[in-house]
Image (cartoon, rainbow, N blue to C red):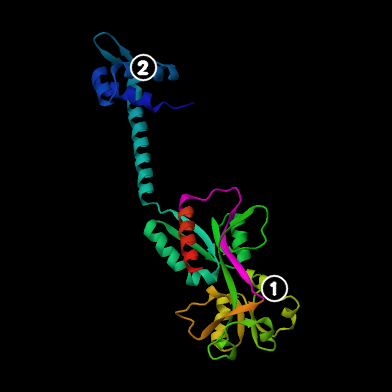
Amino acid sequence: MKYDILGLQAFLGIAEHGNFLRAAASLSLSPTALSHRLRKFEAELGVQLIVRTTRTVMLTALGREFVPRARRILGDIATSLEELRDVGRTHQEIVSLGCLPTLSAHVLPDILRDFARLQPNVAIRLVDQAAPEIADMVLAGTIEFGLTVGATLGPELEFQPIAKSALALICPKGHALAKRSSVEAADLQGLPLIRLGPRDGARIQIEAALGARSKVLRWDYEVHQALSAVRLVAAGLGLTIAPQFAVDPMRDRDVVIVPLARPRIVVTLGILSRKGVPLSLLAQVMIKVIRRRLRAKA
């Protein structure tokens, strides 16, 4: 049954005021509209609650019995709505996203700072993982979108490119190659190298670009994240091929970025989301900030 709250208000108004004119005024209605609501309410219930004559308004026995219940019902509704309104005032909305660790360490803080200025009362849930894990979480709906590198995607995902970044050789500051304007893969023969993990998106592109040469290079270390590779380079343990944004110019002063000329390897950064699933308005605002920041650094 559909509950007629307006009819309930009309009945209680008449019962409490004992007069149609005063009840109508209290509800900001005309007497005619009030009478219509009461008749409709009684018709839906199948009972008569009020008897109206030319001079008086009287409650039927059922009407008198129903008055306290009507007050309680409307009181409960008012309390529930006020509680819901309080929740709405204090509720903090959340944006959930995934991000490559290299970006979350050096690029994302500025992005989040810009976003907080635009949306100061929004909480951020950040998952910093490698590209395959981000794709899995986006697909599962654990996060709304991911800031990641382009890769082979399934039919349920879509990638929006934002910026490109060339991979480079990262070497210790005092290394002989640090003074070069660029290097080639052949220059790395016999040198201790640090390889990224097999699920890293950049690792896949590096091996594809190096081809057979990748198998004869000296890979002394293998790490899960590019940030770890940079730390090992700074410690003098070897050199690595990694995204340039893995290096923090303010922190990583013991390493040097040398462009990799041959082969030139470029990764595409962008937004990964579920195909056909609209992003929330807050996520769209965040993505606009990401676009602005990444394109400024490109």
Rendered view: 171 above or below 79: below
Specify whether 33 is left or right of 168.
left
* Residue underneath mark 1: 209
Q: Where is residue 45 in the image (x, y as percent from the top left)?
A: 43, 20
Residues shaded magenta: 263-282
Amino acid type at image mark 2 = His
Q: Position of residue 61 (x, y in %)?
A: 34, 17
For marks 1 and 2, give the one nearer the viewer: 1
Rendered view: 214 above or below 144: below
* Residue underneath mark 2: 36
Q: Look at the image and tell me whether residue 119 can be seen.
A: no
Q: Look at the image and tell me whether residue 92 can be seen.
A: yes
For the point 31% across and 24% down, which residue is it? 12
| 95 or 189: nearer the viewer | 189
Q: Distance between the residues labelled 1 and 2?
A: 79 Å
For the point 68% across and 70% down, which residue is it? 204
Q: What element carries label 2?
A: helix
Work out whether mark 1 precedes mark 2 in sequence or the reverse, and give the earlier one.
Answer: 2
Rendered view: 249 above or below 283: below
Q: Does the magenta stretch include residue 269?
A: yes
